[in-house]
Image: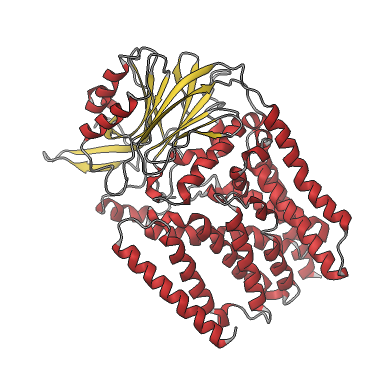
Amino acid sequence: MKKNLKSTILLATGIITLICAYLMWTMPLWGRIPLLFFAAGWTFKVVAGESRFSKIPQKNKLLLLSTLSGILLGAGFPVSPLTFLLFIAFVPLLIVEEEISGWREDASKWEVLKFSFNTFVIWNILSTYWVANTAYIASFVAIALNSFFMTIPIMLYHQAGKVLPGKFRVFALAGYWIAFEFLHMRWELTWPWLTLGNGFAEWPALVQWYEYTGAYGGTLWILLANAICFEIYKTYKKEASLHFGTVGKLVAFILIPCIASLVMYFTYDFSDQKTANVAVVQPNYEPHYEKFEIPEGQVVNQFLKLSQLVVDSETDYLVFPETSVGSVNLGTLKSNRAIRSFKDFVKDYPKLALVSGVGGYEIYRKDVVAPSDARTSVRRNGDTIRYTVYNAAIQIKSDQEETPIYKKSKLVPGAEIFPYHQLFFFVKPLIDKLGGSMGHGTQPNRSVFHNGDMRAAPVICYESVFGEYFTRYIRNRTIKEGDGANLAFVVTNDGWWDHTAGHKQHMKFASLRAIETRRDIARSANTGISCFINQRGDIRQKTKYNQEAAIKSKMYLNDEITFYVKWGDLIGRIALFVSIIFFLNTIVKSLIGRKA
């Protein structure tokens, strides 16, 4: 890189980084400022270390190509409408991998790691910068770790290319990447936000076949399209001409699923299904400085005031957002003042069931052995109590003696769970001293709230990002046949991310869950976006961010089981099996090659 250009970039990005850091230090809410901070900071770091970044002669060209891949991935991901950029986003990175493979075999895997890490840091920054609004330090960790994890399937693909025939490499790429996404959803460091198939949340009409494949069908579609584009590039590079037959195959490969989906979209009919009258409340409390500081009585009055605008004698369900009421002893719900107020409200409406998120806890009696991760507190009288904290949802109905409770079980790493605390047990004393815990409590299976013929899935915030997990409200070993959820409520508190892309992405992902399960969804957010989503993924009655609101609509009750609900992430399991075969094949052939 020319010295003058390098100096100019460093000066500009350095100034931007410092200005953003100052603004984040002085401002209570940051909005999109972290996007500039991370982007400028990463550019400064890469350019400053450019001379040491790689020893490969054409490193600047490869650095630009890997950067282009990251930009295309970010530009194609919601809430951008340019979703079709995802069909070519991996091509520059695949060019980088091929160039490195032809340069120096013995050190190539580490070069692939460095350039692909650059790609995925940029993608993570562009699409999930808003995490910094929730937890500043955690955002650095999330971006760095997730970017590193994403390099693993690329490195495995690179290693497989040394022993596999060229025509099989595309299957190695698809297999390793989907296996990564599949496993990344199933451990305590989970972060499934950037699952490639989520990119089509911006255009749900084009992926109606998710009711068969789930989001991994979209991931497979994207990866295979990228592989075809890469082959077209290589052919053009070699022969200086385009094979229109291959280009035609690419066009057909993209258009046929779109056309099939549009046919499904326009012919899907749910008009003969039973309906429920559902109302949703958005109280609009800023979570960082307002929501948890307001007196409980004022909170209850706000909820009841908004509820009266949309509830009548025909309303079947009223939905409040996540943690609408805090510090609730789940063992003595009847004595909680806020819960009693809600109970008094529903008494005037015999049909009505109220679903609300609560921040709750359970205290263990002295004769009960508490879990190892339970919290400990000493009362004023010197007694020590052990308890577990839950992010939960409850249903209140006038004719129900017992209050059904569901405890959130897909927890946010860092915020609600300390990943693998059994392994890092030595950190527990420090966490206890700081007043934290090793995490929230969970429950082993999903629960369904009943109100006559209506069976509602109480999905809490982060849980709505997990496709197969979401299906378990409809079908799992604790739910009898025909007794699963026939509609779903997502209760959430997306205000932690401020007015950024985060809450919009979260809302759009729920469209994919609606398609996968063919269930209507009502979404109640503390502050935007509350809405209704039908079984085709159409979003209706969207509320605005930072405004109180109350909305109501008819929701259709569907008891049919989709292929995806029945079989779950079948594509992910097949990819995992294929990846194991490719991995073992690579190891065996590498060992044979060394001996030869």
The percent position of residue 419, horizontal first and vertical second, equals 43, 50
Is residue 378 shown above or below 64? above
Hey, which quadrant is residue 260 in on the image?
top right
Q: Which of the two residues, 520 or 328, is positioned nearer the viewer here?
A: 520
Q: Is 193 positioned to the left or the right of 331 in the image?
A: right
Is 419 displayed left or right of 304 in the figure? Answer: right
Picture quadrant of residue 246: bottom right
- Residue at figure coordinates x 43%, y 52% from the top left: 423
The residue drawn where x is 70% and y is 47% is 220
Q: What colouring does the structure picture have?
A: secondary structure
Decide which of 83, 595 is in the foreground and name it: 83
**Which residue sits at x=50%, y=14%?**
453
Q: In the rendering, at what x and y percent does residue 299 appear? A: 26, 34
Q: Residue 582, can we see it?
A: no
Residue at the spot 32% in from the left edge and 34% down from the top edge: 324
Locate residue 245, reporting x and y percent.
88, 54
Q: How many labels does the image show?
A: 0
Is 178 placed left or right of 228 in the picture? left
Viewer-closest of 529 and 182? 529
Judged left or right of residue 552, residue 514 is right
Percent x, y of residue 13: 46, 74
* Quadrant position of the N terminus in the picture: bottom right
Q: Relative to 121, does residue 392 appear above or below in the rendering?
A: above
Mark yes or no: residue 184 visible: yes
Residue lying furthest left in this view? 381
Q: Examine the rendered structure and indicate whether residue 369 appears above or below residue 437.
A: above
Occupied quadrant, residue 372: top left
Quadrant into which the C terminus falls:
bottom right
